[in-house]
Image (spheres, helix red, strand yellow):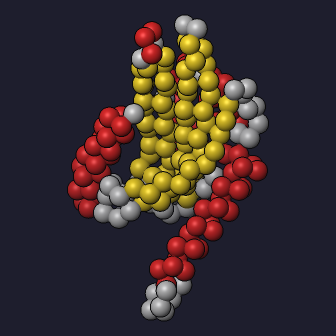
Amino acid sequence: VDRHKPGHRAMVARFVKSEFIAQINAYRRDGNQALAVYHDKEQPFSTAASLDRLSGIANVLKTISPEVDRYLAEYPRNRPPDTEDFYVWQFANFGMKPVMRASHVVIRQFQHDGRTGYVIAGKTLLATHYFRSALELTVLYPQPGGHTTVVMTQRSIIDGFSTWRGRLLRGIIMDRSQKSLQNYLAGI
């Protein structure tokens, strides 16, 4: 895209959106095999392999809902019953420039002491920058008296923090990410 042409920002936005849609459609068809492998450093970075590592870090998902963990790993195969899934676009502005990312979200019901709870798992499929991969987990445990306990964990592999500028940004981004999570929890 020629950045000197009128409307160049809209052309870039259309291109990025079309690439995101193509990547999501490839993922819907082929699962983790379709996720990006970055070749921008000495060692290639596989998004699928990093999600496997993140899943290992977030053992909570394996404990609470091994079916959802397996489904995320083997998608689009082995979809558990009482499960729905969808894709979401997220725009966040917590660093020096806005981030657009696409995630696959899976919601599954479970029974806890005779009440219905929910496991909500999301994995980042691609992002414009910062995030190489991410896994998010929210569990809603129903409690007596109509109360709900919310348990959240997020794990991500973030790129670009090895330079002096990245180390400076890391503190800003971590602070803004924590504030965003606190606002989210307060909202629910």
Q: Which residue is found at the position 76% from the left and 36% from the top?
A: 77
Which residue is more in the foreground, 140 or 173?
140
Q: Residue at x 66, y 55 (%)?
A: 24
Residue 70: which quarter of the image? top right
Report x, y in % for residue 65.
Answer: 60, 22
Image quadrant containing the C terminus: top left
The x, y position of residue 144, in whole percent, is 45, 9
Q: Is residue 70 visible?
A: no
Horizontal and vertical percent position of residue 39: 55, 61
In the rendered image of this protein, does residue 23 appear above or below residue 105?
A: below
In this rendered view, identify the residue nearer to me: 163 or 54.
54
Q: Is residue 98 left or right of residue 7?
A: left
Which image quarter is the N terminus in? bottom right
Q: Is residue 18 above or below residue 99?
A: below
Residue 119: image quadrant is: top right
Residue at 55% across, 42% down? 123
Total marks in image: 0
Name above or below for residue 138 compared with residue 14.
above
Judge whether 65 appears above or below 156 on screen. Answer: above
Residue 106, position as x, y percentages in the image: 61, 36
Q: Is residue 117 left or right of residue 171?
A: right
